[in-house]
Image (tube, grey):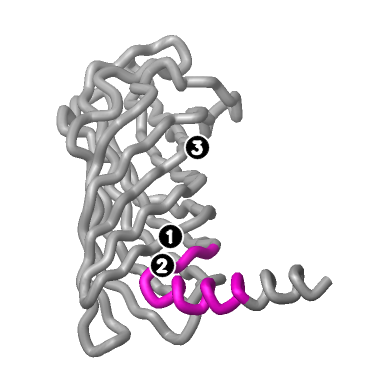
Amino acid sequence: MKKLTLLAITLMISSLSYGQFFTLGPKIGFSSSKLKLSDNIDAIKEKDAQLGFHAGLFTRFSLGGFYVQPEALFTSVDGQVQINEGGSSPSNQIVDLEYNKLDVPVMFGTTFLKIFRLQAGPTASLLLSADAKSSLSGVKEDVKSSYKDATLGYQLGFGVDISRLVIDLKWEGNLSSFGDDLSLFGQTFQTDQRNRLLTLSVGFKLIN
């Protein structure tokens, strides 16, 4: 019993010391995402930004005023496009797109004035699912085959640490397209697709 108590005290002291340069905790947040079509052809147009969410874990390794912050996040983002139907009585169909991904950003940053942070780094994304829903018929279709399974992007942003709270505001872009064509309800559109995100997240340091 004494040995177990001594071991527990040793682990607690080690954790407190370790927390000076390592932290770990959960993270949740929201995003505003906009699907960008670089080949914005007449048949299909990009629409307004949509709201999404993310949740997962973050870690941070600090040394002096610099740090590395890897994260693992389940991310759900939306996009919206308008299909312009031709013919004598044209109709415009709005399609809502939902993407579920596993995102792994690795942020490199610096701390100033003790609580503020500047950061930037790459992010890898693994596509888990992609669905499209028509505004006209209400039909939902699996469109995952239209997209790459994995993509690489980048993030940059600003952060604030308040006691155990970690607040991050980041902008994310793609280094390459995540889809070169899009098949929706029997139609295929050749267009380069990229996603632009503005994310706001809050984390909690379990180790501080």
The crowd level at tag 2 (other Cα within 10 Å; few <14, some 14-19, many 20+) is many
Residues rendered magenta in the picture? 10-25
Q: Earlier in the sequence, mark 3 or mark 1?
A: 1
Q: Is residue 14 magenta?
A: yes
**Closer to the camera in the image, 206 or 119:** 206
Q: Amino acid at mark 1?
A: Thr
- What residue is rendered at 23% in x and 76% in y? 64
Q: Amino acid at mark 3?
A: Asn
Relative height, residue 43 to residue 81 (above, below):
above
Mark 2 sits on what residue? 22
Closer to the eye: label 2 or 3: 2
**Residue 175 in which image quadrant:** top left
Under tag 3, what secondary structure?
strand
Residue closest to the far front: 3
- The span from disc 1 to disc 2 (Cα, nearest Å) is 7 Å
Q: Amino acid at mark 2?
A: Phe
- What residue is rendered at 40% in x and 77% in y? 20
Residue 77 position within the rendered picture, expressed as x and y whole percent measured from the top left = 45, 45
- The span from disc 2 to disc 3 (Cα, nearest Å) is 29 Å
Mark 1 sits on what residue? 59
**Residue 6 in which image quadrant:** bottom right
Residue 91 position within the rendered picture, expressed as x and y whole percent measured from the top left = 40, 27
Closer to the eye: label 3 or 1: 1
Q: Which mark is residue 100?
A: 3
Residue 8 position within the rendered picture, expressed as x and y whole percent measured from the top left = 69, 72
**Closer to the camera in the image, 155 or 11:** 11
Decide: marks 1, 2 in contact (CB < 8 A)?
yes
- The span from disc 3 to disc 1 (Cα, nearest Å) is 22 Å
Q: Which mark is residue 102?
A: none
